[in-house]
Amino acid sequence: MNSSGNNYDNLLASLRGEFVEEAEDNLTSIEMLLENLRAGQEGGASAIDNIRRYAHSLKGSAGVADFPVVSMIMHRMEDYLSGAKELSEKQIDDVQVFIDRARDFSSLDIEQNKTASSELVRQLPNRHSKDSLDEMEGDAEQRVIEALMVTREKAAGQIFERELKEEGLRVTTVRSSFEAIEMAVRAKPNIIICSGVIDELSGVDLSCAIKSIPVTKDIPVCLLTSFEKGHHELEGLRDDVYLIQKSNLKEDLKNILEKYNLSS
């Protein structure tokens, strides 16, 4: 047993050591791309695509090596860059903030990487929906309201994500129910919206799970659906999970956001 335990500890230490080296290489590569953008030496869309690739790679390897905060930071950076074809000086500075925070957490030990990260998430640069990646005056003073969207339906997810952003919310979208639970626990968003069909867990299953976890039970959870309450497809749905009807999306969303004072 001791030998097996030692072998596992050694393997984990080796994996984490490799990750720290990989993280530094990827972060340095992103910084070089940012410097090229500042100097006008590289096409914007091409450089941003490369930055996204580095971020996506680092997000995955961080999860495997048990650096959840780094993984979350890279996820946020991907969201920030989504749809961008050019970056202004301010936006390049914002991306540098993501890099600096990821570098900070990639050098910490396991326990420090598992500390509550909801405050960190809210301090990361915010991409405002209505102006896409355009700069906004007074951004630093703007109230940050976090929404977690859980869906595998890309088209429907994009429509609903746009509605949330129109209301001034900052949206993180995940495709997996298990990733959603981790994100809910670590980031503690202000509201969570699940689609009806996700993966091994349905939206009903996931919403019940989130409302059953002590640290997330008070977060408003909504189910995006075409069904009315009482429909057999919604069997087991808790009374404290709200329905957002696809046919009445704007109105239902507005009512929920007003109820919890979540409009910015």
Image (cartoon, grey):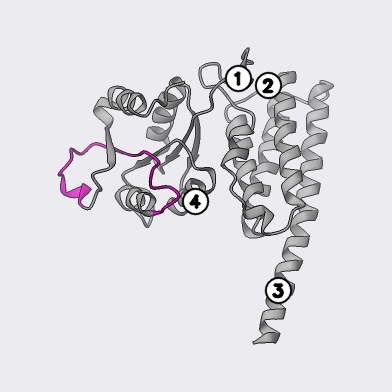
> Can you say whether 210 is above or below 52 in the image?
below
Q: Residues within 10 Å of mark 4 (few under 14, many from 20)?
A: few
Which one is earlier in the sequence, the residue at label 1 or at label 2? Answer: 2
Q: CA distance from mark 4 to mark 1?
A: 30 Å
Q: Amino acid at mark 3?
A: Asp
Q: Position of residue 103 (x, y in %)?
A: 76, 44
Q: CA distance from mark 4 to mark 2?
A: 30 Å
Which one is earlier in the sequence, the residue at label 3 or at label 4? Answer: 3
Nearest the eye: 168 or 201: 168
Which one is earlier in the sequence, the residue at label 3 or at label 1? Answer: 3
Q: Amino acid at mark 1?
A: Glu
> Is residue 231 rendered magenta in the image?
yes
Which one is earlier in the sequence, the residue at label 4 or at label 1? Answer: 1
Horizontal side of residue 231 vs 253, given as left or right: left
Judging by the rendered image, the residue that carries numbered circle 3 is: 9
User: Which quarter of the image is occupied by the N terminus?
Assistant: bottom right
Judging by the rendered image, the residue that carries numbered circle 1 is: 141
**Mark 3 or mark 1: which is in front?**
1
State which region is magenta.
213-235
**Mark 3 or mark 2: which is in front?**
3
Q: Quadrant of residue 2?
A: bottom right
Q: CA distance from mark 3 to mark 2?
A: 44 Å
Please, what secondary structure does the residue beneath circle 4 have?
A: helix
Judging by the rendered image, the residue that carries numbered circle 2 is: 86
At horizontal 46% and vertical 48% (from top left) the residue drawn is 180
Q: Amino acid at mark 2?
A: Glu
Judging by the rendered image, the residue that carries numbered circle 4 is: 179
Q: CA distance from mark 3 to mark 4?
A: 25 Å
